[in-house]
Image: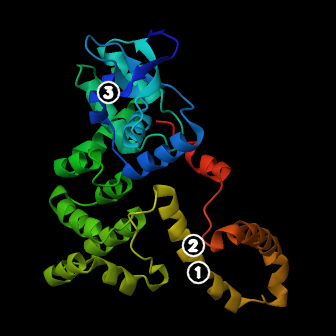
Amino acid sequence: MATQSLDAVTLPVEELATSFLCARCIRPALVGQMAGSLTTLGQLTPLVAVRQAVKPEVIDGFKRHAAAKLLGLTTLRVSVVALDEVARWAAMLALNQGAGRMTELDEALVIQKIVAQGLTQVQVSQMVHRHKSWVSRRLGLLERLHPELVEAMRLGLLQPGVARRLLALPQGNQLLVATAAQQARLGPRDTELLVGLWQRATDHEVRKQLLAQPVAALKAAFPERSTPALDPRLTAGDQQLSRLLHQLAVTAPRAARLLPAAPQDLPILAPLLSQAQQEISRLASALGPCASGAPRSASDAAGATGSSSS
């Protein structure tokens, strides 16, 4: 994949086209995180765009672009590269290698675009330096997911993690369960549990009740996981923090009731007890300044947002 890169230049935000966003899943919470990073730290990394006759087309940096528009910024730094029609899609994958930068469904959407250029799956695998089974599995995700859910995921109306859990169902049932999960604001893990309950239920009325009251059904079936509905005001990272804190509030008292361990078991449990004590001490230190509701410092915010570079 030959490219001719230029140094980063400053371009007006409104002069950047984003039609390649059709192969990415919009995640509003991450855009909000990026807006915080831009406000605190400024733009750390230039966007990457390809030359077009009218406007440069962004191929990397969609969150930065969306956050800039949200903040009312007028310019961004952009590296403009020369790529042919096929290579620009492959570059989207290459520029987002690494854990958490793209979901499997993001990758599937990009691969679908490459295949649409007339390449075979083997040719695509060679281009992106992956095994052909990797390409096949991702295309299979889109084939198994209901088209309406693919579009909802792409538009940011459905979390990719939630969509991934719905793949266990036939397409006809995916829409029903997805609607119930979204109305109840279930996260990926609770959606997975709801899908499991749906699969085990054979009675029509039982399934109807699952869809009508999914949160109540999950609490009844998994009382130890009575996780509250996600608060849409929280960023994706703090939604995860909310779930973990809830789990701690449930499991910590249970562990305390089981202590102390039997004397004959102490030699076996000693490493785990020591590790738990160290982690709890670190957690208590971290909770101290947060428990009062005081905002995090700029350096803390930077640590939370700096990794979201797309």
Whether tag 2 and tag 1 are in contact, CB under 8 A, the answer is yes
- The tag on residue 14 is 3
Question: Which comes before the other along the chain, label 2 or label 3?
Answer: 3
Residue pictured at 20% horizontal, 82% vertical: 209
Identify the secondary structure beneath mark 2: helix
Distance from the alpha carbon under mark 2 to that under mark 3: 41 Å
Residue pictured at 36% horizontal, 33% vertical: 135
Amino acid type shown at disc 3: Glu
Distance from the alpha carbon under mark 2 to that under mark 1: 6 Å
- x, y percent for residue 106: 36, 40
Amino acid type shown at disc 1: Ala
Identify the secondary structure beneath mark 1: helix
Residue on which disc 2 sits:
245
Q: Is residue 165 above or below residue 199?
A: above
**What is the quadrant of residue 140 in the picture?**
top left
Is residue 130 visible to us here?
no
Distance from the alpha carbon under mark 1 to that under mark 3: 47 Å
Identify the secondary structure beneath mark 3: helix
- x, y percent for residue 75: 43, 26
**Label 2 CA crowd tier, 10 Å (few <14, some 14–19, many 20+):** few
